[in-house]
Image (cartoon, rainbow, N blue to C red):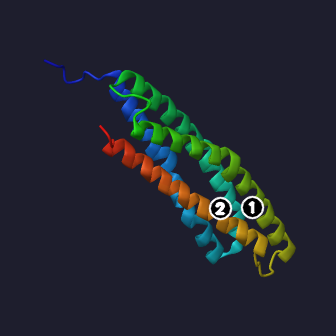
Amino acid sequence: MTTPFAITGYEISLFLHITAVMVGFGATFAEAIAAPVAARMDPRHLPYVHRLQIAINSRLATPALVVVLATGIYQVVDGDWEFGDVWISGSFAIIIVVGGLLGGYFMPTDRRLEAMASEEIAAAGPTGKVTMSEAYQQAARTEGIVGAVVGVLLVVAVFLMVVKPGV
């Protein structure tokens, strides 16, 4: 007989794992629409969007990534799983790629885009029409494409963890 409040370390780890994914990466999906909405409203909002994306990636996604990685390792060790299982090694590969892109691409790119947008807005003056340069637009489009790829990778990781192919 089990008691109604008997909770295992594995269950706590699983709860933390899923919560970290939801909180840490859920907000990153909204980033895909933040810049286009801001640009349509008024390009003067774009520096804020880039600052917001840096905050989301540094204060939500990166800590969540650490929790996901730590709890994932715990679950493999504590559960009846092997690091060599395709669904586990694939998920770990995805989380490592996402972590590398967060620190090595997204945050530096948003810092650069924020600076570019701020300079272009200042050049237009307080009341002038702001038209973002082709260099800014190209960098922002590239970031959007990379962001979409990361979004797909995160969905693939969730699929692998739910379906557990090969098990």
Residue type beneath disc 1:
Leu
Secondary structure found at label 2 = helix
On screen, residue 160 above or below 29: above
Of the numbered discs in the image, which one, if any, rests on residue 144? none
* Tag 2 near tag 1, CB within 8 Å: yes
Secondary structure found at label 1 = helix
Near mark 1 (Cα within 10 A), the count class, few <14, some 14-19 or many ≥20, is: many
Indicate left or right for 29 with 100 as reference: left
Q: Position of residue 164 (x, y in %)?
A: 33, 41
Indicate left or right for 35 with 19 as reference: right
> Mark 2 — residue?
143
Q: Position of residue 132 (x, y in %)?
A: 75, 75
Q: Residue at x 50, y 48 (%)?
A: 25
Near mark 2 (Cα within 10 A), the count class, few <14, some 14-19 or many ≥20, is: some
Q: Position of residue 148 (x, y in %)?
A: 54, 61
Closer to the camera in the image, 132 or 43: 132
Q: Position of residue 140 (x, y in %)?
A: 68, 66
Query: On the image, which quarter does residue 50 sit in?
Result: bottom right
Mark 2 vs mark 1: give the one in front: 2
Closer to the camera in the image, 33 or 152: 152
Of the numbered discs in the image, which one, if any, rests on residue 113? 1
Q: Residue at x 25, y 21 (%)?
A: 6
Which quadrant is home to the N terminus? Answer: top left
Q: Residue at x 37, y 33 (%)?
A: 14
Which quadrant is home to the C terminus? Answer: top left
Indicate left or right for 24 with 117 as reference: left
* Alpha carbons under labels 2 and 1: distance apart: 10 Å
Indicate left or right for 19 with 130 as reference: left
Residue type beneath disc 2:
Glu
On screen, residue 129 above or below 51: below
Sequence order check, earlier mark of 2 and 1 = 1
